[in-house]
């Protein structure tokens, strides 16, 4: 229990540090949101400076940071200049869309990677394993961007899938099962892109850990006791290989918010990706900081999640933690 | 009398090149024949890379030989399918060299020793625990340590656990694959005495694989010397020590310091 308290405390400090740094770095970037307005002859310099004062951009950095921290404490994440609304609800809607995409993709990728990796490890070095290794290696070197664009071209040519967006225009008129179907069709393409992008790495990790575990004499001993092959693979070898995979799972949970940004932008999925890109270009300061902080929160949360899983899965870690 | 284990003309080839179709095959076993009568110990001595462990894995049905026959109690185990093998496997058990990796690090001593019962679906749960504790007694592991995990045991104790696990299914043949090589001298002596004691009380048959002639002489009735995939000499222990015939045997004898000290003149023969 104390172990988790300590871990959580670490996480809070880390987030605090990240927020401070993002604030500092974004203050160091040249220009701000209102500089563009100054170039616009239709907006008077008085209006711009009034806006600057209204948004407190004239105040020194520590004061702004303190203000922002206060806002965070009240469940807000500052104010978006471009959307003229608080950042938190803005981010929330987009994060929800991103999560719908990435959670589906992550679960699908792991569900495929585990049996495929074990299957490959059981045939380590033989022809089927080599073919699979070659395939995953090839897929690994294909950049995400090329993959997403390729799928997009496929969708345009065949017309099987919609080429962007969250739902169809007539979504509100559809019945519940039709709505689900519509959402599924829109999800398909970006999900495929994400799965194909992450799958090769996962399969290779699973294959390597399981193959290593299969070499252990205690598995040979179990085989010597007459254990069925499938139970040896999934019951013993996979469990013996679990620790690095659990860490990897936590890490992939950590990239849920940040891993799909590129695919979202290319496939115009209304998630965090396009929003963050826009805000960075427009120097919409608090949206950017909010987005970075949210991604960071997930990364830290994902690692904490992995630690909890490890603690639950490995009795050795439990003993070591309670001994401290 | 029919021997418990009879191996005839066993061949095991591994592909040497990258491709399995490669013509350069590596012969790990190049026509090995041996037999062990029930209740006896055969020591298989040889340098590393001479094919000893491959032979062990073939006899334990963990590797399939390229050709040749392995007859256990008159049944040719090399021809059995996976389901038939599962019935034979309990009779032949292995103890490995490295005590650290031969025990599942996540399990307690009790879980490790009772695992074979779960695999073979023998006994009810309470009985399994009782049997496992009795096994711990047999190998002199204190019962109060039954809840500990392998990393809390010493090397010798780990090997005792591995032996207890091998005994669980009441095997006829135990293959000791360099089982003493990773241990200190004093611990080696303790474990080898334990092995002799278990042999006399359960009537076990051992295939003792080693590169240490002194240990082989201590444990075995017969010694077979292996060199490059072949058995080059196989005699009762006494004979082989007095008059080694093959070059490989003499080289191995010369490498056993404890033996040279006690019977110095024999080495020069």
Image (cartoon, coloured by chain):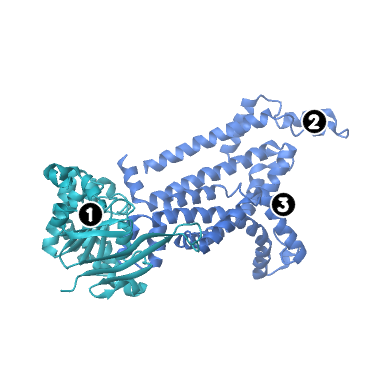
**Which chain is rendered blue in the image?**
A
Cα separation, mark 1 vs mark 2, equals: 80 Å
Q: Nearer the viewer, residue A243 or A250?
A: A243
Task: Choose the circle earlier in sequence order: 2 or 3.
Answer: 2
Cα separation, mark 3 vs mark 1, equals: 59 Å
Label 2 sits on a secondary structure element that is helix
Q: Which residue is mark 3?
A: A266
Q: Nearer the viewer, residue A100 or A195?
A: A195
Cα separation, mark 2 vs mark 3, equals: 34 Å
Q: Is residue A80 above or below residue A219?
A: above
Residue beneath the point at 42% across and 48% down: A308
Q: Which residue is mark 1?
A: B161
Chain holding disc 3: A
**Which chain is rendered cyan in the image?**
B
- Which of discs 1 and 2 lies nearer the camera? The answer is 1
Label 1 sits on a secondary structure element that is helix
Residue beneath the point at 67% across and 40% down: A287
* Residue A67 position in % (x across, y down): 62, 31
Chain holding disc 1: B
């Amino acid at each position: 229990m104390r172990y988790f308290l300590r871990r959580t405390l670490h996480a809070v400090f880390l987030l605090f540090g990240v927020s401070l740094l993002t604030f500092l770095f974004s203050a160091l970037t040249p220009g701000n949101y209102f500089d563009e307005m100054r170039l616009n002859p239709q907006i008077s310099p008085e209006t711009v400076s009034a806006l600057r004062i209204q948004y407190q951009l004239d105040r020194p950095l520590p004061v702004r940071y303190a203000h922002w921290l206060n806002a965070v404490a009240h469940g807000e994440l500052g104010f978006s200049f471009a959307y003229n609304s608080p950042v938190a609800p803005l981010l929330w809607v987009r994060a929800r869309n991103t999560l719908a995409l990435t959670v589906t993709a992550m679960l699908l990728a792991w569900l495929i990677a585990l049996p495929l990796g074990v299957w490959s490890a059981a045939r380590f070095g033989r022809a089927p394993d080599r073919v699979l290794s070659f395939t995953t290696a090839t897929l690994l070197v294909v950049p995400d961007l090329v993959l997403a664009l390729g799928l997009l071209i496929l969708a345009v040519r065949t017309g099987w899938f919609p080429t962007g967006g969250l739902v169809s225009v007539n979504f509100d008129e559809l019945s519940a099962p039709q709505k689900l179907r519509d959402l599924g069709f829109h999800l398909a393409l970006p999900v495929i892109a994400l799965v194909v992008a992450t799958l090769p790495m996962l399969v290779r990790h699973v294959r390597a850990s399981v193959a290593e575990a299969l070499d252990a004499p205690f598995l040979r001993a179990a085989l010597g006791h007459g254990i069925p092959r499938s139970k040896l693979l999934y019951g013993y070898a996979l469990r013996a290989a679990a620790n690095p995979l659990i860490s990897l799972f936590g890490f992939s949970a950590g990239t849920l918010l940040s891993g799909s940004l590129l695919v979202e932008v290319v496939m115009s999925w209304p998630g965090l990706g396009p929003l963050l890109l826009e805000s960075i270009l427009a120097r919409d300061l608090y949206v950017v900081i909010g987005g970075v902080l949210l991604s960071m929160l997930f990364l830290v949360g994902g690692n904490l999640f992995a630690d909890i899983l490890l603690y639950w899965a490995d009795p050795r870690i439990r003993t070591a933690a309670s001994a401290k | 009398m029919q021997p418990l284990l009879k191996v005839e003309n066993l061949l095991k080839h591994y592909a040497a090149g990258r491709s399995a179709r490669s013509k350069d095959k590596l012969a790990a076993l190049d026509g090995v024949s041996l037999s062990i009568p029930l209740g006896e110990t055969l020591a298989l001595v040889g340098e590393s890379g001479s094919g000893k462990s491959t032979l062990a894995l073939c006899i334990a049905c963990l590797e399939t030989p390229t050709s040749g026959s392995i007859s256990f109690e008159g049944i040719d185990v090399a021809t059995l399918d996976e389901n038939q093998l599962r019935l034979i496997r309990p009779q032949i058990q292995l103890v490995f060299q490295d005590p650290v990796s031969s025990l599942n690090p996540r399990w307690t001593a009790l879980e490790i020793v009772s695992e074979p019962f779960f695999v073979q679906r023998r006994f009810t749960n309470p009985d399994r625990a009782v049997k496992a504790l009795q096994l711990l007694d047999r190998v002199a592991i204190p019962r109060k340590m039954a809840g500990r995990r392998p990393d809390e045991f010493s090397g010798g104790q780990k090997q005792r656990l591995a032996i207890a696990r091998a005994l669980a299914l009441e095997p006829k043949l135990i293959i000791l694959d360099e089982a003493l090589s990773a241990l200190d001298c004093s611990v080696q002596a303790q474990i080898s005495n334990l092995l002799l004691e278990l042999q006399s009380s359960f009537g076990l048959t051992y295939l003792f694989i080693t590169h240490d002639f002194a240990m082989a002489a201590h444990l075995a009735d017969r010694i077979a010397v292996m060199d490059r995939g072949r058995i080059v000499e196989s005699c009762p222990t006494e004979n082989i020590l007095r008059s080694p015939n093959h070059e490989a045997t003499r080289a191995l004898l010369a490498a056993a310091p404890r033996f040279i000290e006690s019977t110095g003149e024999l080495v020069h023969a």
